[in-house]
Amino acid sequence: MGAYAQELRATAKAMVARGKGIMAMDESNGTCNKRFAALGIPTTEEYRQVYRQLILTAPNLSNYISGPILYDETIRQSTTDGTPFVQFIQDAGMIPGIKVDTGAKDMAGHPGEKVTEGLDNLRDRIAEYYAMGARFAKWRAVITIDTAGDLPSWGCIEANAHGLARYAALCQEGGLVPIVEPEVLIDGDHTIERCLEVTDRTLAEVFVQLRNQRVEFDQMVLKPSMVIAGKTCLQQAGVDEVAAATIQCLQKNVPATVAGIAFLSGGQSIENSSAHLNAMNVKFRDRCPWPVTFSYARAIQQPALDYWRGDSRRIPEAQQRLLRRAEFNSAASLGQYSS
Ligand code: 13P
């Protein structure tokens, strides 16, 4: 048994506690700046700090959120009154998390596909983040589906699954609960059946690799994408169909001992993100061995970001818009959401 096993088990449970989800706010500077630029918000560290403070200080965020996932820049920042973000999070009764991958990069020999990097020096970075107060981590791998039916390649699925497993093992060694995130991208015109097939193969390989690397399932959280038709597919699946296909795929591939499932929103509409999660919990709760909740970024943040637009006078109302989505998704994790 690993040195941190007990602590990891308790942290993993707390991350997916009843009625709670995880707040993804770990956009890299590049991604954050892209979202700011689209709204005319200055792409500076100062504005990124203000925005992250807006999120973290939203009143009673901890009613709905077990912990936020931070980015390397953010975990070193403080509120304007000088309280380190990490301390603010702990004082609010939440658990600080940290993104540790260094991004999905073009994969050699695999045109159109990506492999996630970040294993170099990861043991040392984990030790630093643990010492700073982080108690869980995230690593995102992306799998692309193409129209021709050639992608994803087997090599891409295998390499990304292997990376996730190596990362997860290092996290558990160093006291961080790994969020294992294999995202099958929503981009494209593929059908829900094709998404099911790809998600099935991806999750199967992820769990083979996790086993091979001796990752403890009760000390990790899985962050999958939902099984859903591609964004530009003319035949969009209904809410119940998405919920049924997603749960079917998870039941087939995810060991019962995994501490929890926390979905990404992946570019779905904010309404669908809540409705799909709700339908899964209304219809299949009794048949799932793990809690099924959310770890959304866009589906919680977007209304707040759109309203704030960098204007300090708009912060209180932007926080209310953020809290509304957090509350709705919390309700959806209990099967109690109605739009
Ligand atoms: P979205 O909910 O916007 O997909 O983001 C979740 C996430 O953490 C992606 O890595």
Image (cartoon, rainbow, N blue to C red):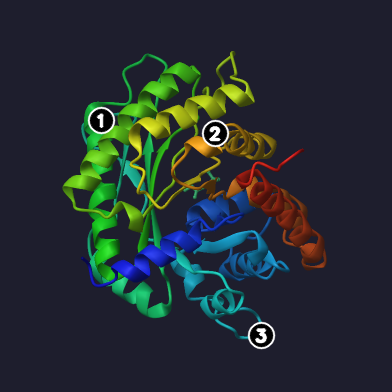
Q: Residue at x 42, y 16 (%)?
A: 147
Amino acid type, callout 1 = His
Q: Which residue is depicted at the point 33% across and 44% down?
A: 105
Q: Is residue 273 left or right of residue 143?
A: right
Rounded to the nearest angstrom, the CA distance separating label 2 from label 1 is 38 Å
Disc 3 + disc 2, Cβ < 8 Å = no
Observer-nearest of 339 and 118: 339
Which kind of residue does numbered mark 3 sit on?
Asp
Residue placed under numbered mark 1 in the picture:
110
Question: In the image, which is nearer the foreground, mark 2 or mark 1?
Answer: 2
Element under label 1?
Answer: loop
The answer to the question of whether label 1 and label 3 lie on touching residues, with beta carbons closer than 8 A, is: no
Q: Residue furthest front?
A: 286
Going from N to C along the chain, the mark reached first, 3 or 2, is 3
Asked if one can make out residue 231 in the rendered structure from this viewpoint, the answer is no
First-in-chain label (2 vs 1): 1
Q: Whole-percent x and y of residue 63?
A: 67, 63
Label 3's element?
Answer: loop
Q: Is residue 149 visible?
A: yes
Q: Residue visible at 71% across and 42% down?
A: 337
Residue drawn at (74%, 61%), measured in percent from left and top?
A: 319
